[in-house]
Amino acid sequence: MKSQQQNAFSLIDAHLIAKSLKIALLVGTILMLINHGEALFNNQMDIQRGIKAALSYCVPFCVSLYSAVSSAREYQ
């Protein structure tokens, strides 16, 4: 019998990852521009802001992937 963790990972496929990446690109860009757009356009980006800007993409990716896997688990 598979554990729940193994079962959840088996639901992650290329389609879900691709869809999550597309959502993260769109939502992350919007969030990055809202939060760091002024610094970006005024050439005031530093390492700390760069890390925060990268997280603007990571969070929507994780949320989207988690939602897709949770939804897939319900229908399995």
Image: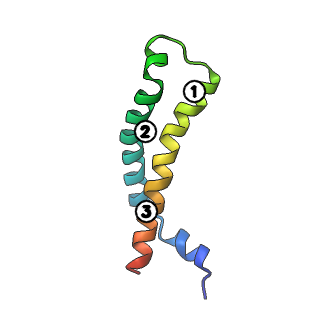
Label 2 near label 3: C-beta < 8 Å? Answer: no
| Amino acid type assigned to the residue bearing label 2 in the image | Gly
Res 50 label: 1
Q: Earlier in the sequence, mark 2 or mark 1?
A: 2
| Amino acid type assigned to the residue bearing label 3 in the image | Ser
Location of mark 2 (residue): 28
Along the horizontal axis of the image, is 42 left or right of 15?
right
Of all residues shown, which one is farthest toward the bottom? 1
- Looking at the image, which residue is at 60% across and 31% down? 51
- Looking at the image, which residue is at 52% across and 31% down? 53
Measured as percent of width and height from the top left, residue 72 is found at 40, 72
Find numbered disc 2 in the image and state the secondary structure of the residue it sits on. Answer: helix
Q: Is residue 59 above or below residue 3?
A: above
Q: Quadrant of residue 74?
A: bottom left
Q: Is residue 71 above or below residue 49?
A: below
> What color scheme is it?
rainbow
73 vs 34, nearest the viewer: 34
Q: Is residue 59 above or below residue 66?
A: above
Cα gap from disc 3 to disc 1, whole angstroms: 27 Å
Along the horizontal axis of the image, is 74 left or right of 48?
left
| Amino acid type assigned to the residue bearing label 1 in the image | Gly
